[in-house]
Image (cartoon, grey):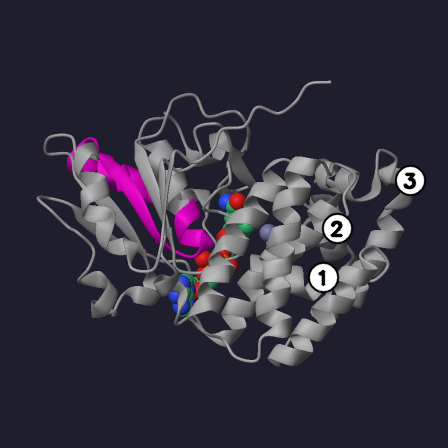
Amino acid sequence: MKFRNFKMVDYVVYGRGCFDQVDDILAPQRKGDAPIVFLLDHYFENSEALKSRIPLRGNDALIIANVEHEPKTSYVDEIAQSLKDKYGTVSGVIGIGGGSTMDLAKAVSIMMTNPGKAQDYQGWDLVKYPSVYKAGIPTLSGTGAEVSRTTVLTGPTRKLGMNSDFTPFNQIVLDPALIKDAPKNQRFYTGMDCFIHCVESLKGTFINEFSRSYGEKAQALCEEIYLHKDEWNDESDEQLMMASYAGGMSIAYSQVGVAHAVSYGLSYLLGTKHGLGNCIVFNHLQEYYPEGVETFHKMVKKNDIYIPEGICKGLTDEQFDVMINVSLGMAPLWENALGKDWQQQMTREKLRALYEKL
Ligand code: NAD
Ligand code: ZN
């Protein structure tokens, strides 16, 4: 048996207001005139309160990341090329935003030092050279993108991450004050990504004590904030931020499962966003995760959240086939969820019936 030897984030700073330490943290990373590039989630484009605190020095650049759609390889190439044209090289790339902006920052930093196109690196361990310095600063919590060794990208032929030892951030800045104003629905969808990571990790066949100890803690934190508390407060932001971190650590050594495998199909065909797509699917997974789904239903009710239904109505056979192909392509997720004989259990017909329910 070969055990995974995984690369983690190098440095972590946690605490309310720690964003103000970013200038000091970056100082040793500055190399001559090469700028630091801040990729800022477009949600904050007009937020002077946050923008004025970004420590721009010398010829540093602030780029507004358009994350209306989840990141595409072509967008990564466009940003990396424009930085190369303008500066030659950069001292670092800092992503400030949700999972999409953090993934974009990881991918751009990799493309600053690796030849070709971003799509060439979608897969496992294809990245050849270390990226430039990169840091992630979440403004939404739940995806675990801040700790993961992947950056999920939609390319011309597939939706797949750049999974590599060169992908994790060199630094993450976990400041719970930055997630404070996220709208209720968005906060729920992204938070449920974390809850679903935990259920899929804990109920999966790949589970081990490493993943369990992080997953149980993260799941308990999610239940505390979405189920047992009457009001959202500062402590909820702190708990959600740490749940996201621990949930990410849990799947680092196990795997996600049915909701993610099915939701990837929705996202590929319909552009459904990751957190929302997971909620739409998980809502119907009683057969696979009975307790987790029951708790999920309670959390939806308590937080008065709308989960869309009927999103696959009217799709053609060809469109169902596209989703089924994408989903069945995620072999490790199915194997984690259902075991080695998953192909006997999850037939195309069964998966089609599941998509038709959504
Ligand atoms: P997101 O980054 O896609 O952002 C969703 C929306 O919220 C965007 O419109 C964004 O502008 C806005 N937003 C960001 N911060 C906000 C704030 N504080 N207040 C209000 N709005 C804010 O959402 P997400 O759920 O954090 O991330 C999903 C993305 O993460 C997907 O692209 C998915 O593929 C990726 N992902 C990556 C990993 C990984 O390990 N790398 C894991 C899971 C998901
Ligand atoms: Zn997820």
Respond yes or no on whether mark 1 lies under 8 Å from ligand 2: no
Q: Secondary structure at mark 3?
A: helix
Measuring from the top left, give residue 204's x and y in whole percent: 76, 43
Q: Secondary structure at mark 2?
A: helix
In front of the other: 194 or 239 = 239
Where's the C terminus, which quadrant?
Answer: bottom right
| Residue located 60% across and 54% down the image | 218
Disc assigned to residue 281: 1
Specify the quadrant of the image occupied by residue 243. bottom right
Disc assigned to residue 258: 2
Is residue 267 something one can see in this rendering?
no
Left or right for 160, reference 318: left
Give the magenta part as a residue range.
78-103
| Residue located 85% across and 48% down the image | 348
> Is 79 colored magenta in this rendering?
yes
Vertical side of 57 occupied by 50: above or below: below
Is residue 290 something one can see in this rendering?
yes
The residue singled out by tag 3 in the image is 344
Measuring from the top left, give residue 196's x and y in whole percent: 66, 56
Q: CA distance from mark 3 to mark 1?
A: 21 Å
Specify the amino acid type for callout 3.
Gln
Specify the quadrant of the image occupied by residue 307. bottom right
Disc assigned to residue 82: none
| Residue located 45% across and 46% down the image | 146
> Is 100 colored magenta in this rendering?
yes
Vertical side of 313 occupied by 90: above or below: above
Measuring from the top left, give residue 332's x and y in whole percent: 72, 36
Q: Earlier in the sequence, mark 3 or mark 1?
A: 1
Q: CA distance from mark 3 to mark 2?
A: 15 Å
Measuring from the top left, give residue 100's x and y in whole percent: 45, 53
Whether pointer 3 and pointer 1 mark residues with C-beta atoms closer than 8 Å, the reply is no
**Tag 2: Cα neighbours inside 10 Å, few (<14), some, or many (≥20)?**
many
